[in-house]
Image (tube, grey):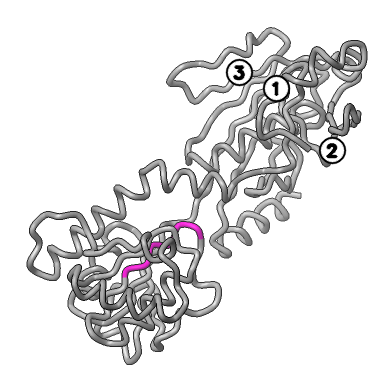
Amino acid sequence: MFNHFLEEARRLYQMKEPFAIAFVVNRQAPSSGKPGDKAVIEKNGTVNGWIGGGCTRGIVVKEATDAIRDGKPRLVRISPESTGEPMENSNVKDYRMTCHSGGAVEVYIEPVLPRPQLLVMGKSHVAMALSRLGKAMDYTVTVVSKAADAEMFPDASAIVSQTEIPDGAVYPNTCIVVCTQGENDEDALEQAVRSEAPYVAFVASRRKANGIFHTLRQRGLDFDQLKRVKTPAGLDINAKLPEEVAVSILAEIIAFMRSEEAAGELAAEAANPDIFINPVCNIPVSKSTAKHVITYKGENYYFCCDGCRTTFEKEPEKYAFSTPVGSES
């Protein structure tokens, strides 16, 4: 069991997929989760391991996917005595246990996120400076450029000596900087824009960039695709030297990764359609493991215990319209 837990964590880490680790740290009978129980939870809510069933599972899955999105660890308390009120500026999440089975449990959740990847296209002096400084920031640095080698980029994590970005090389927190500076600019930028990287920058003057954009429009790229390219690349700090330009670009990347725009993209990436908010007790329920499913006016409602199902069936009109937005079946 423990080996399987480690293998799942290693598999996701090697695939550069974000996940969370959940540990049961305290338990009051008859809750089924016991101290030492653990699970690896993927961004889509898949649970590999055991942290309890019923209400506990849905709550932990919901909090784990939230942790993957915001990168913050948390302690989840589920107890009949809990108020369920949010604790301001705290990493403790309180939920009131409404299941008639009773019991209480505390689960610690730790997100494990892949290091940001800096994908540098080109072998210019700016590209070399980005590789050096990117390593200093503990980024995974991948260089894509024909004839690039380890002598040029001794600090790079990987060097791809070709002009094409390899399949599978771009993942959700990849930042692409095109600094080809005259060497296949159009081809490199087109690849970057067509990728799913959330951040794309082009090292060029505004005039040169506009000329490249015109060519790319003729190749079929539209305005919405091109407008996300940050050019001139980097924050305006009046940079002149390659190292200064690299600093300005990395500063812009940091600002972007901490922005609401990036958070929104990660939230979409971590969105979990399996989670449904029980309208009776407001407890997250996993659709795939729900004990009861009731269809009312064409909508499915999911419940993990008999009590909430019975309450809903007595007064469906009272609860059917209180279901939070985004929790539809």
Mark 3 to mark 2: distance in Å?
22 Å
User: Which of the two residues, 218 or 324, is positioned nearer the viewer here?
Assistant: 218
Is residue 191 depicted above or below 309 in this figure?
below
Describe residue 327's horizontal placement relative to residue 143 as left or right.
right
Instruction: For residue 265, say whether it is visible.
Output: yes
User: Is disc 1 placed on a helix, strand or loop?
Assistant: strand
Q: Nearer the viewer, residue 145 or 100?
A: 145
When the figure is inspected, residue 248 is found, relative to residue 323, above or below; the finding is: below
User: Visible in this render: residue 101?
Assistant: no
Which region is colored magenta?
172-177
At 73% across and 55% down in the image, what residue appears? 4
* Disc 1 to disc 2, C-alpha distance: 19 Å
- Chain-order first, disc 1 or disc 2: 1
- Residue drawn at the location 47% of the way across and 77% of the way down: 220
Q: Does the stretch in magenta take in 216?
A: no
Point out the frontmost of discs 1 and 2: 2
Q: Residues within 10 Å of mark 3 (few under 14, many from 20)?
A: some
The crowding category of the residue bearing disc 2, from other C-alpha atoms within 10 Å (few below 14, some 14 to 19, many at least 20), is some
- Image spot of residue 57 (x, y percent): 75, 33
Where does the image place residue 68, in percent across and percent down from the top left? 55, 43
The mark that comes first in sequence, 3 or 2, is 3
Which residue does the numbered mark 1 point to in the structure image?
105
Which numbered marker is on residue 94? 3
Q: Are marks 1 and 2 in contact (CB under 8 Å)?
A: no
